[in-house]
Amino acid sequence: MARPEKSRNIHEPPLYTEFRPVGMGGMMDAVIMTIDEYEAIRLSDLEGMTHEQAAEEMGISRPTFTRLLDSARTKIADMLVNGKRLLIEGGNVNFRFMIIRCADCGHMFRIRSDHIPEACPVCGSKNLILMAPPFGGRRHRGGHGRGRHGRGGPWGKGPHR
Ligand SMILES: [Zn+2]
Protein backbone atom coordinates (compact mmCIF):
# COMPACT_ATOMS: atom_id res chain seq x y z
CA MET A 1 0.00 0.00 0.00
CA ALA A 2 1.19 3.54 -0.75
CA ARG A 3 2.15 5.73 2.16
CA PRO A 4 -0.95 7.03 3.95
CA GLU A 5 -2.00 10.48 2.81
CA LYS A 6 -3.40 13.12 5.08
CA SER A 7 -7.16 13.46 4.91
CA ARG A 8 -8.45 16.54 3.12
CA ASN A 9 -10.88 18.96 4.74
CA ILE A 10 -14.12 19.23 2.79
CA HIS A 11 -16.76 21.80 3.67
CA GLU A 12 -19.69 19.43 3.22
CA PRO A 13 -20.63 16.39 1.14
CA PRO A 14 -21.77 17.03 -2.45
CA LEU A 15 -25.54 16.82 -2.89
CA TYR A 16 -25.33 15.74 -6.52
CA THR A 17 -23.11 12.76 -7.09
CA GLU A 18 -24.09 11.38 -10.48
CA PHE A 19 -24.37 13.01 -13.91
CA ARG A 20 -25.05 11.44 -17.30
CA PRO A 21 -25.57 12.56 -20.89
CA VAL A 22 -29.19 12.84 -22.06
CA GLY A 23 -30.46 10.49 -24.75
CA MET A 24 -27.97 7.68 -24.45
CA GLY A 25 -28.67 4.26 -23.02
CA GLY A 26 -27.18 3.32 -19.70
CA MET A 27 -24.05 1.75 -21.08
CA MET A 28 -21.61 4.67 -21.38
CA ASP A 29 -18.34 4.56 -19.46
CA ALA A 30 -18.16 6.32 -16.11
CA VAL A 31 -15.61 8.80 -14.85
CA ILE A 32 -15.09 8.67 -11.08
CA MET A 33 -14.27 11.99 -9.44
CA THR A 34 -13.16 11.81 -5.80
CA ILE A 35 -14.70 14.19 -3.28
CA ASP A 36 -11.39 15.99 -2.75
CA GLU A 37 -11.22 16.64 -6.51
CA TYR A 38 -14.80 17.93 -6.39
CA GLU A 39 -13.86 20.27 -3.53
CA ALA A 40 -10.86 21.56 -5.50
CA ILE A 41 -13.15 22.52 -8.40
CA ARG A 42 -15.65 24.12 -6.05
CA LEU A 43 -13.11 26.25 -4.19
CA SER A 44 -11.13 27.33 -7.25
CA ASP A 45 -13.69 27.62 -10.03
CA LEU A 46 -16.87 28.45 -8.12
CA GLU A 47 -15.64 30.30 -5.03
CA GLY A 48 -12.77 31.91 -6.94
CA MET A 49 -10.08 31.13 -4.39
CA THR A 50 -6.40 31.17 -5.31
CA HIS A 51 -4.58 27.84 -5.15
CA GLU A 52 -2.88 29.05 -1.96
CA GLN A 53 -6.18 29.90 -0.26
CA ALA A 54 -7.86 26.69 -1.38
CA ALA A 55 -4.92 24.53 -0.29
CA GLU A 56 -5.07 26.17 3.15
CA GLU A 57 -8.83 25.56 3.31
CA MET A 58 -8.37 21.86 2.55
CA GLY A 59 -5.33 21.45 4.79
CA ILE A 60 -2.99 20.32 1.98
CA SER A 61 0.04 21.72 0.18
CA ARG A 62 -0.35 24.02 -2.82
CA PRO A 63 1.24 21.51 -5.26
CA THR A 64 -1.14 18.80 -4.01
CA PHE A 65 -4.07 21.15 -4.51
CA THR A 66 -2.95 21.96 -8.05
CA ARG A 67 -2.68 18.25 -8.87
CA LEU A 68 -6.20 17.64 -7.55
CA LEU A 69 -7.60 20.52 -9.58
CA ASP A 70 -5.86 19.43 -12.79
CA SER A 71 -7.12 15.89 -12.34
CA ALA A 72 -10.69 17.10 -11.68
CA ARG A 73 -10.69 19.35 -14.76
CA THR A 74 -9.43 16.54 -16.97
CA LYS A 75 -12.27 14.32 -15.75
CA ILE A 76 -14.88 17.00 -16.44
CA ALA A 77 -13.48 17.48 -19.95
CA ASP A 78 -13.53 13.73 -20.57
CA MET A 79 -17.16 13.57 -19.46
CA LEU A 80 -18.24 16.56 -21.58
CA VAL A 81 -16.38 15.64 -24.75
CA ASN A 82 -16.70 11.87 -24.67
CA GLY A 83 -20.23 11.63 -23.24
CA LYS A 84 -19.41 9.71 -20.11
CA ARG A 85 -21.24 9.45 -16.84
CA LEU A 86 -19.67 11.28 -13.92
CA LEU A 87 -19.79 9.83 -10.42
CA ILE A 88 -18.51 11.72 -7.38
CA GLU A 89 -17.42 9.44 -4.58
CA GLY A 90 -14.54 8.31 -2.38
CA GLY A 91 -11.31 10.05 -1.48
CA ASN A 92 -9.58 10.51 1.84
CA VAL A 93 -11.82 13.23 3.20
CA ASN A 94 -13.02 14.80 6.40
CA PHE A 95 -16.28 16.78 6.30
CA ARG A 96 -16.54 19.97 8.38
CA PHE A 97 -20.30 20.00 7.99
CA MET A 98 -22.80 17.28 7.32
CA ILE A 99 -26.11 17.54 5.55
CA ILE A 100 -28.86 15.63 7.27
CA ARG A 101 -32.29 14.76 5.95
CA CYS A 102 -35.23 13.76 8.10
CA ALA A 103 -36.72 10.57 6.68
CA ASP A 104 -40.14 11.43 8.09
CA CYS A 105 -40.75 15.09 7.16
CA GLY A 106 -38.07 15.58 4.48
CA HIS A 107 -36.47 18.55 6.25
CA MET A 108 -32.82 19.01 5.23
CA PHE A 109 -30.30 20.86 7.35
CA ARG A 110 -26.57 21.47 7.64
CA ILE A 111 -24.78 20.85 10.91
CA ARG A 112 -21.19 20.71 12.17
CA SER A 113 -19.85 17.17 11.92
CA ASP A 114 -19.18 17.03 15.66
CA HIS A 115 -22.66 18.27 16.58
CA ILE A 116 -24.96 15.69 15.06
CA PRO A 117 -28.40 16.15 16.67
CA GLU A 118 -30.51 13.38 18.19
CA ALA A 119 -33.71 14.43 16.49
CA CYS A 120 -35.17 16.46 13.62
CA PRO A 121 -35.54 20.11 14.72
CA VAL A 122 -38.83 20.39 12.78
CA CYS A 123 -40.78 17.23 13.64
CA GLY A 124 -38.72 15.62 16.41
CA SER A 125 -38.23 12.38 14.47
CA LYS A 126 -35.08 10.39 15.22
CA ASN A 127 -35.18 8.87 11.76
CA LEU A 128 -32.32 11.01 10.37
CA ILE A 129 -30.24 10.21 7.30
CA LEU A 130 -26.65 11.42 7.00
CA MET A 131 -25.93 12.61 3.48
CA ALA A 132 -22.44 11.21 3.04
CA PRO A 133 -22.03 9.52 -0.33
CA PRO A 134 -18.73 7.76 0.44
CA PHE A 135 -20.49 5.81 3.15
CA GLY A 136 -23.59 5.04 1.11
CA GLY A 137 -26.15 7.23 2.90
CA ARG A 138 -25.58 6.10 6.45
CA ARG A 139 -28.71 6.21 8.57
CA HIS A 140 -28.06 7.97 11.84
CA ARG A 141 -29.89 6.86 14.97
CA GLY A 142 -28.67 9.27 17.61
CA GLY A 143 -25.45 8.72 19.54
CA HIS A 144 -22.16 9.19 17.74
CA GLY A 145 -20.95 7.02 14.91
CA ARG A 146 -23.21 4.14 15.79
CA GLY A 147 -25.73 4.62 12.99
CA ARG A 148 -26.67 1.51 11.11
CA HIS A 149 -26.02 1.31 7.42
CA GLY A 150 -29.16 2.04 5.42
CA ARG A 151 -29.94 2.33 1.74
CA GLY A 152 -32.69 4.94 1.78
CA GLY A 153 -32.86 8.19 -0.14
CA PRO A 154 -31.37 9.40 -3.40
CA TRP A 155 -27.88 9.36 -1.88
CA GLY A 156 -28.16 5.92 -0.40
CA LYS A 157 -28.04 3.81 -3.52
CA GLY A 158 -24.29 3.45 -3.78
CA PRO A 159 -22.28 3.39 -6.97
CA HIS A 160 -23.85 1.84 -10.09
CA ARG A 161 -20.93 0.03 -11.56
ZN1 LIG B 1 -38.52 15.84 10.53
Image: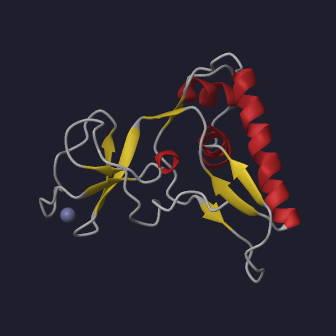
Q: Residue at x 76, y 80 (%)?
A: 25
Identify the image quadrant of residue 90. top right
The image shows residue 24 at horizontal and vertical percentages of 78, 80
Q: Is residue 35 above or below residue 94?
A: below
Q: Quadrant of ligand 1?
A: bottom left
Given residues 54 and 145, the one toward you in this image is 145
Res 115 → quadrant = top left
Image point (80%, 39%), residue name: 70
Kindly indicate the quadrant of the structure image that contains residue 5: top right
Instruction: Name the quadrant of the C terminus.
Output: bottom right
Across and down, in percent, residue 34 comes to 65, 43
Name the residue rendered at 60%, 57% in the picture: 159
Q: Nearer the viewer, residue 129 or 78?
A: 129
Q: Residue furthest right?
A: 82
Query: Between residues 50 and 41, which one lies in front from this camera angle?
Result: 41
Vertical placement of 142 versus 82: above or below?
above
Looking at the figure, which quarter contains the N terminus?
top right
Left or right of 78 on screen, residue 93 = left
Toward the left, the furthest residue is: 124
Q: Position of residue 67 (x, y in %)?
A: 77, 31
Query: At x 40% / y 66%, what residue is drawn?
Result: 153
Residue 8 in the figure: left or right of residue 76: left
